[in-house]
Image (tube, rainbow, N blue to C red):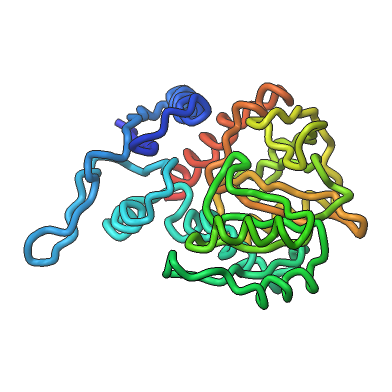
Amino acid sequence: MKKCLILVNAYSQLKSSLNQSERLAEELKKLGVEAEIKRNDFFACYVSEGGFLRSCAGEYDFCIYLDKDKYISAMLEKSGLRLFNSHTSIQLCDDKMLTSIALADSGVPLPETLAGLLCYDAQSDVSETALRAVEKKLGYPLIVKASYGSLGSGVFKADDFSSLLAIARELKCTPHLFQRFVSESAGRDIRVIVVGGEVVAAMLRSSETDFRSNIELGGVGTPVEVDRELGKLCIRTAEALGLDYCGIDVLLGEGGYLVCEVNSNAFFGGIERVTGINVAGAYAKYIYDKIYKEQ
């Protein structure tokens, strides 16, 4: 029997996350694969007494890893289980600064980005000298992002030095970054889904009330045609990060497209509704062919 494991976060209550796993299980079933959805709370792998890696997932042919727990993904992969996406790819996308570093010099245009200074002392104040350097480099308004976060959370816009200082103080003990604000794309971006090196679906996301365009924050999605330039850019981005599946957020800069963020576990419920494209089916078919047809 063909069987796979779909691992979701141990604590997530998001309907989008539940939809993601259920849709994939539904599409895999059509291909003859039994998918078992589990929360990532049963210690699928562990290090035993004596230092041996033990896995409780040996009955599965592969795992669709819809979590960002880097320890379990690393152990599962080391045990020999094929993950979609890979441990390394998930980690590169989970940390927005690591995403920018990985994409740098790969031919992928990005907004100008500075890494936030790490602070380990909650009693220390932020360096105003460093913030003045950020101000000089990026101008206002500018974006400050927590390195970890999704659905638009942890993303702030600083309009002047006082707001920059306040945001930096709030995030000082959290990994973060500073980024040029692409004013031409305020409240607008294009979400592109790439599966197996091919563009599957895309939508323009827009908001009239927020500089962020996320559907979860009130943004509205409309179908959009992917031109040759955008398609090549998104495929190059996915390849540079080693992704089987991803959602790429592209800003509409004055000089052309700019990759803003890459989500290795991008929710596809919204884009399926907007475009009518069966994203889950495309992902399931790609995985099936990888596991069962390429052996």
Q: Is residue 81 left or right of residue 209?
A: left
Along the line of sight, the residue nearer the viewer: 109 or 52: 109
Please say if 95 is above or below 213: below
Residue shown at 39% from the left, 29% from the top:
33
Q: Most extreme residue toward the left, as rendered?
A: 49
Q: Is residue 28 left or right of residue 44?
A: right
Residue shown at 76% from the left, 37% from the top:
210
| Label tally | 0
Residue shown at 73% from the left, 55% from the top:
158
Q: Position of residue 10 (x, y in %)?
A: 33, 37
Q: Position of residue 279 (x, y in %)?
A: 62, 31
- Quarter where residue 178 is shown: bottom right
Q: Position of residue 234 (x, y in %)?
A: 72, 52
Quarter containing the N terminus:
top left
Q: Is residue 167 left or right of residue 61?
A: right
Q: Position of residue 81 (x, y in %)?
A: 32, 51
Please say if 287 is above or below 113: above
Residue shown at 14% from the left, 63% from the top:
52
Please say if 54 is above or below 115: above
